[in-house]
Image (cartoon, coloured by chain):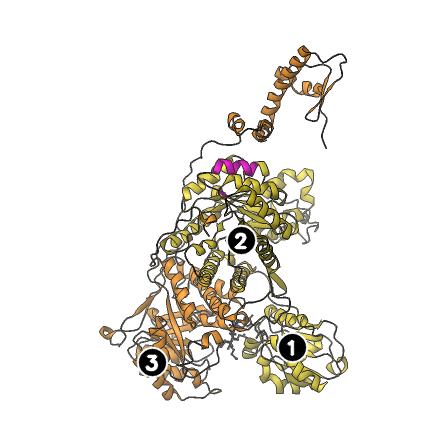
């Protein structure tokens, strides 16, 4: 965005201080605009006719440095690009890297559908939500338009994930678009050889398009310029992902160069970037090495500026690490990482249900909470105010103490003797050393749970019924 | 949805454009002709109608083009020939690429150099190591085109002075040497290509074996005998015991320029610094994910303890992928950027306890404890990649030295960091037609 301070944005706002945007003053709203934590359209007064000129001007000034591009339609629509900074601590990165896994048009139907389902259904619980894969790439291996169209059709029937249609042959792409045009797929790719025909398709079907110029930044920029000149603005740039050696080093530098130029204001090149770690499969024959190297490339380009990524391995070791490194880089550093200290109910606890203690560090709390709820354990779970520190570090650092636990109970108005039939507190295994103190401080009986909350179900079978 | 346009409307629209009126003719939608003038449809009328319609069509096409509509496609479709597309000149489609040169500038704000630190000493410098290792010296973020990295990344592999519990995927590689730190160290160097080894004296912890410092120092001597690479010496993490353990270890390693791990704010760092100064070693300045604490400790080591700059390495703490790596990554990146921009309290090379990745349950648990999770697959594959991805992302944030455990992870991490460093040649691969070649 072209503005640096709330004051600059403030000048364009109505100045009514009416609070309709959800914050009390225009100045406060201006800070949110700069931080990108509220949208300009949240201020309804500025949408009125009399402010129209200012609205248009401000909207332009607030537009992110890197263009945003939408792929797909409806609920699973994927947005990429839209970044304003080179380092995540300076603001945050927006629109996390879209992960697209491939199928190809020489697969038989059964394998195809099975693979689509695996991509569509993969999910991993993490800090209160599910991490999921975003898109499906359909690759034309046969180079036959009919075959490709047929595959695209089957994929569309099996899933509503957005698609990348991949072929260097415009006829093949067209066949795919005929089937998939309502789903706003990304087409891949326009090259030095086919750009005119692909541009035609992009215009005719009004879909986003990838420009592919392997290790040729002048060509990439020329293509970008030519396409925007023709009115095609939904662009994704693939500078080529070479999988190894000096070529990979250059690939990495190309990503850095393009993004730096874009953030520094070269609008011609300020489009989302595509990485293709899939090329790792061109250098390794054995699937394990290939999948490892592919994940290495995926991590590299998640950290440094890949906005969308084409991938092949759907083995869990690849997917888990790819999803987690993506989440790592796109976690908003401004977001608090704690939950409110309180006694929470998991399931429908009764007076006979166990009472567990954990910390208010979000990662810890949600891990424990999901271990309990997914195993159908009805219970009370107390998040002690450890200032957002996990169990082991909080015990070591003195944020998880008997006094804190007692205070937590009082603040939550929870009286163990009355609200439970057993008057028992279950501590995390890693907080075992607090046992005596907690007994003294709360006059409750204290049991020590397993070190990892994933083991609570087994521990319950063994320990809990015995004392009930 | 079709909007009816009468020719009369069109006539009005085209008034200033020299189009003659066609009376009594209505064109509805795009194909229906309604001849309401009565009479027969004679050929003269048909001709004049056709002529006028064509004229109007030309104007419509021109207007459509002005509005940016790709008219050619319609023509191509209705004429049913490819050549028709080429025939109609295409104002929205360009025939030639608009040439444009890509340019980008170097980062102006990186004006300072990260301190170089050399670990290990050869006989020329009064030690017994076969080689030394130098880290630091960067003028840019790692692998950036602004300025080449002067030294590659290095890996120091862990050795413990007693058998410890570890993930199965790791343990299988060390079962035969677990009771013998010297053999363990040898295995790391010979079989696993470790650049350095770290001997962790964890048995000295009063809560474990409370091994006396003197005995622990003996293990250090054994390791120095067993391998000729530079070494790191780590304590148990017990703040009361570590200073005396590291002091003794520093003494027996005199002249070898080891890295003493670690000085931290919650123990007697001055004593560790003193030992390093006296016996000629470097110090690892370890803080817990807190950039200001890192500044403070570095300042104290330099100003209060007189540790020379070329003897300081930082460990700003490594948290595993999924378990705080977002903090650890950004903490390192901020530290490195600050160093490059001239913060002299932060311009030191960095070290990461990448082994911490094995603490993540995704790395070691047989399967997910959550019913809603998809299958996690074999843990033998998950663990190493967890360590690799944790290390790789920190290498991008500026980390120089990696403390690691799994031999497979070490190999892959070295391959990617050295590729980015520029020292790995590979046969070049043509990706121009990758789509169909996989
Ligand atoms: C990230 C981290 C930090 C971060 C903490 C960030 C945060 N928000 O918590 C920071 C850098 C701040 C930190 C600081 C310190 N840390 Co620290 N830290 C870690 C690290 C790398 C990961 C911890 C983590 O997040 N785990 C993930 C969470 C989800 O785990 P958890 O909260 O324990 O929850 C699990 C279990 O406890 C259990 N569980 C949780 N609740 C419940 C409830 C019940 C009923 C049951 C049954 C089970 C259960 O299941 C959960 C899921 O597995 C570990 C090393 C490692 N790899 O484990 C060291 C570690 C925990 N830290 C350690 C230490 C010593 C410290 C410091 C004291 C260091 C120092 N000298 O200053 C400080 C203390 C700071 C403070 N408290 O103010 C030691 C603890 C050693 C010990 N056993 O005492 C560890 C093990 C590292 C080590 N080997 O030295 N640390
Ligand atoms: S809604 Fe608009 S006018 Fe009202 S306070 Fe917010 S920014 Fe100001």
In the rendered view, does B234 fall on the left or right side of A84?
left
How many angstroms separate mark 2 from mark 1 (CA)?
37 Å
Q: Secondary structure at mark 3?
A: helix
Mark nearer the viewer, 2 or 1: 2
Magenta stretch bounds: A189-203
> Does residue B89 belong to the magenta stretch?
no
**Label 2 C-beta lies within 8 Å of the nearest ligand 1 atom:** no
- Chain ID for label 3? B
How many angstroms separate mark 3 from mark 2 (CA)?
49 Å
Chain B tint as drawn: orange
Classify 10 Å Cα crowding around label 1: few (below 14), some (14-19), many (20 and above). some
Q: Which residue is mark 3?
A: B223
In the rendered view, does A10 fall on the left or right side of B147?
right
Quadrant in which residue B209 is drawn: bottom left
Chain A tint as drawn: yellow
Q: Which residue is mark 2?
A: A102
For the residues labelled 2 and 1, say whether their Cβ atoms are less than 8 Å apart. no
Q: Is residue A262 above or below residue B282?
A: above
Is disc 1 on the same chain as disc 2? yes
- Chain ID for label 2? A
In the rendered view, does A119 fall on the left or right side of B207?
right
Tell me the number on the disc at residue A457: 1
Is disc 2 on the same chain as disc 3? no
Earlier residue among tags 2 and 1: 2
How many angstroms separate mark 3 from mark 1 (CA)?
44 Å
């Amino acid at each position: 965005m072209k503005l640096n301070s709330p004051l600059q944005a403030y000048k364009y706002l109505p100045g009514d201080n009416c609070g309709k945007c959800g914050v009390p003053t225009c100045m406060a709203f201006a800070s949110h605009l700069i931080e990108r934590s509220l949208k300009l359209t949240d201020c309804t007064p500025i949408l009125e006719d009399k402010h129209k000129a200012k609205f248009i001007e401000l909207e332009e000034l607030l537009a992110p440095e890197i263009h945003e591009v939408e792929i797909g339609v409806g609920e699973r629509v994927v947005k990429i690009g839209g970044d304003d900074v080179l380092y995540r601590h300076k603001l945050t990165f927006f629109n996390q890297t879209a992960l697209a896994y491939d199928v190809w048009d020489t697969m038989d139907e059964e394998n195809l559908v099975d693979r689509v389902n695996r991509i569509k259904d993969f999910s991993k619980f993490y800090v209160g939500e599910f991490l999921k894969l975003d898109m499906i790439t359909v690759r034309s291996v046969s180079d036959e338009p009919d075959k490709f169209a047929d595959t695209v059709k089957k994929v569309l029937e099996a899933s509503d994930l957005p698609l990348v249609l991949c072929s260097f042959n415009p006829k093949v792409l067209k066949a795919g678009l005929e089937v998939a045009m309502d789903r706003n797929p990304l087409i891949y790719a326009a090259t030095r050889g086919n750009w005119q025909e692909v541009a035609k398709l992009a215009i005719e079907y009004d879909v986003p398009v990838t420009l592919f110029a392997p290790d040729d930044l002048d060509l990439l920029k020329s293509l970008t310029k030519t396409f925007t000149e023709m009115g095609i603005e939904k662009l994704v740039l693939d500078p080529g992902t070479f999988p190894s050696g000096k070529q990979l080093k250059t690939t990495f530098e190309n990503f850095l160069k393009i993004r730096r130029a874009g953030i520094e204001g070269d609008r011609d090149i300020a489009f989302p970037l595509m990485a293709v770690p899939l090329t790792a499969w061109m250098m390794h024959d054995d699937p394990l090495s290939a999948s490892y190297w592919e994940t290495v490339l995926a991590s590299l380009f998640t950290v440094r500026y890949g906005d969308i990524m084409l991938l092949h391995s759907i083995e869990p070791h690849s997917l888990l690490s790819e999803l987690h490194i993506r989440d790592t880089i796109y976690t908003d550093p401004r977001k608090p990482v704690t939950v409110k200290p309180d006694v929470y109910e998991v399931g429908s606890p009764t007076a006979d249900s166990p009472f567990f203690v954990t910390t208010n560090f979000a990662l810890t709390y949600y891990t424990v909470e999901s271990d309990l709820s997914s195993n159908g354990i009805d219970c009370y779970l107390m998040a002690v105010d450890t200032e957002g520190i996990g169990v082991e570090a909080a015990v070591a650092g003195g944020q998880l103490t008997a006094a804190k636990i007692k205070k937590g109970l009082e603040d939550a108005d929870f009286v163990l003797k009355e609200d439970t039939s057993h008057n028992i507190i279950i501590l995390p295994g890693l907080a075992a050393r607090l046992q005596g103190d907690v007994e003294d401080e709360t006059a409750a009986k204290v049991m020590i749970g397993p070190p990892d909350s994933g083991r609570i179900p087994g521990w319950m079978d063994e320990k809990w019924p015995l004392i009930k | 949805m079709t909007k009816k346009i009468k020719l009369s409307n069109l006539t009005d629209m085209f008034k200033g454009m020299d189009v003659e009126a066609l009376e009594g003719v209505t064109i509805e939608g795009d194909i229906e002709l309604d001849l309401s003038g009565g009479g027969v449809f004679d050929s003269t009328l048909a001709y004049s109608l056709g002529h006028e319609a064509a004229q109007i069509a030309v104007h419509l096409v021109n207007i459509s083009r002005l509005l940016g509509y790709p008219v050619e496609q319609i023509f191509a479709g209705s004429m049913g020939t490819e050549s028709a597309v080429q025939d109609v000149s295409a104002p929205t489609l360009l025939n030639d690429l608009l040439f444009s040169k890509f340019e980008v500038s170097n980062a102006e704000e990186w004006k300072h150099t990260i301190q170089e630190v050399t670990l290990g000493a050869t006989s020329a410098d009064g030690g017994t190591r076969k080689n030394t290792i130098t880290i630091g010296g960067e003028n840019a973020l790692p692998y950036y085109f602004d300025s080449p990295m002067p030294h590659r990344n290095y890996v120091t592999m862990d050795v413990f002075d007693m058998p410890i519990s570890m993930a199965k995927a790791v343990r299988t590689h060390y079962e035969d040497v677990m009771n013998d730190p010297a053999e363990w160290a040898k295995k790391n160097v010979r079989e696993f290509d470790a650049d350095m080894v770290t001997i962790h004296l964890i048995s000295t912890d009063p809560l474990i074996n409370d091994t006396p410092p003197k005995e622990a120092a003996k293990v250090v001597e054994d390791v120095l005998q067993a391998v000729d690479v530079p070494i790191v010496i780590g304590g148990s993490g017990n703040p009361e015991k570590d200073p005396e353990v590291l002091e003794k270890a520093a003494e027996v390693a005199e002249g070898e320029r080891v890295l003493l791990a670690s000085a931290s704010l919650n123990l007697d760092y001055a004593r560790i610094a003193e030992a390093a100064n006296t016996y000629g070693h470097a110090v690892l300045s370890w803080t817990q994910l807190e950039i200001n604490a890192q500044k403070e400790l570095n300042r104290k080591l330099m100003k209060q303890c007189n540790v020379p700059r070329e003897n300081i390495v930082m460990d700003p703490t490594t948290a595993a992928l999924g378990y705080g790596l977002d903090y650890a990554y950004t903490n390192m990146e901020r530290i490195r950027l600050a160093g490059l921009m001239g913060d002299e309290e932060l311009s030191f090379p960095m070290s990461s306890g990448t082994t911490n990745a094995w603490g993540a349950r995704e790395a070691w648990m047989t399967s997910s404890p959550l019913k809603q999770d998809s299958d996690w697959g074999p843990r033998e594959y998950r663990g190493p990649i967890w360590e690799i991805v944790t290390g790789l992302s920190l290498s991008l944030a500026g980390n120089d030295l990696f403390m690691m455990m799994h031999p497979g992870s070490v190999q892959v991490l070295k391959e990617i960091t050295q590729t980015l460093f520029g020292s790995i040649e590979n046969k070049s691969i043509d990706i121009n037609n990758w789509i169909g070649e996989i």
